[in-house]
Amino acid sequence: MLYEGVLRKMQTEIGNPIQYYLVFENDFINMNQLLDKEIQIDFIKFQCLNCGRERPIYRQGFCKSCFYDSPAAGDWIMKPELSTAHLDKEDRDLEYEKQVQLQPHIVYLANSSNVKVGVTRKTQVPTRWIDQGAHEAIEIVEVPNRYLAGITEVALKAHVSDKTSWQKMLTNRIDDVDLAEWRDKLHSSIPEEASEYFLTSNTETQMDFPVLQYPEKVKSLNLDKTPSYKGILKGIKGQYLIFDDSTVFNIRGNEGYFVGVSIN
């Protein structure tokens, strides 16, 4: 069976295990149903997620011009502390920026390869944690805008990492930790502007990923270098497909690539 479409990050549904869906314009695939089946992925062309044109993908699924023009790729996306909509100040498109920035945001702790701090919109809980391959996570602050979340993250980065080792996450060499204990330890480091939003009584969320076999070492599939790949799907974690030969494929990292997916 052949499916074709432009890659976007897989949609997810929390459960035991988490359900993954690869969604194309006119079809979708429940990826959990493909475990232990042979899949072939063929690169066909580029298709920018913003303008839809066949242009090389630069970053985040956008061609170069869209990456530097679209409000969905502003610096405040990756650096929430740069948000300015709460000041009524435009970066690229104030209406868009108000829509995204002026809504409840969560600062959280997640454990995927190590304990890390992160920021997401409240509506993206637990999706954000799933996308990062975290097997446990906890909210520590809920604030009314992205800027407050950003300055909180910056303050906490002095005490805990804000990065995930994707290789360690995919080999599942991880330790369980008490995230509530970490939350309480970091309480005094939260900036004064956000201290009133500290969450004291919530508990950890656990994530169960559909993985039959973790690799000892990982090798990443690069469609620019290997435009056709075939392997048996052994697991899905974060936004990665894990294959029987230890190849891993980052769906989100290849957004904007138009591919064919054959199921044998």
Image (cartoon, helix red, strand yellow):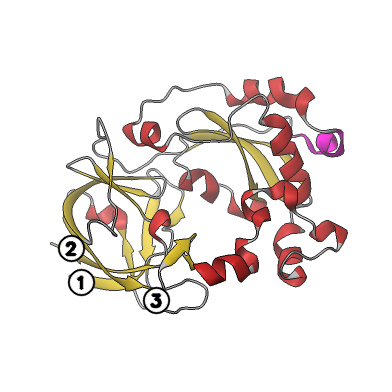
Q: Is residue 64 above or below residue 237?
A: below
Q: Main secondary structure of the magenta part?
A: helix
Indicate the secondary structure of the residue bearing disc 3: loop
List the residue tagged with mark 2: 263
Task: Judge the density around disc 2: few (<14), some (14-19), many (≥20) Cα neighbours within 10 Å.
Answer: some
Mark 3 residue crowding within 10 angstroms, few (<14) / some (14–19) / many (20+): few
Residue 81 sits inside the magenta stretch: no
- Name the foreground residue: 14 vs 245: 245
Q: What's the residue type where badge 1 is placed?
A: Leu
- CB under 8 Å between callouts 1 and 2? yes
Residue 135 lies, in percent from the top left, at: 46, 35
- Amino acid marked by disc 3: Glu
Relative image position of residue 105 (x, y in whole percent): 70, 49
Secondary element under disc 2, as helix, strand or loop, is strand
Q: Is residue 241 above or below residue 9?
A: above
As displayed, is residue 67 above or below residue 113?
A: below
Q: Residue at x 79, y 66 (%)?
A: 90
Q: Answer whether residue 142 is visible to the viewer in this image.
A: no
Determine contact: label 1, label 3, CB under 8 Å: no
At horizontal 73% and vertical 46% (from top left) the residue drawn is 81
Q: Which residue is mark 3?
A: 25
Q: Earlier in the sequence, mark 1 or mark 3?
A: 1
Q: Which residues are magenta?
A: 192-198
Q: Which residue is mark 1?
A: 2
Q: Is residue 260 left or right of residue 47?
A: left
Residue type highlighted by circle 2: Ile
Secondary structure category for the residue under label 1: strand
100 or 165, which is in the foreground?
A: 165
Q: Which quadrant, please, contains the N terminus? A: bottom left
Q: Is residue 220 left or right of residue 150?
A: left
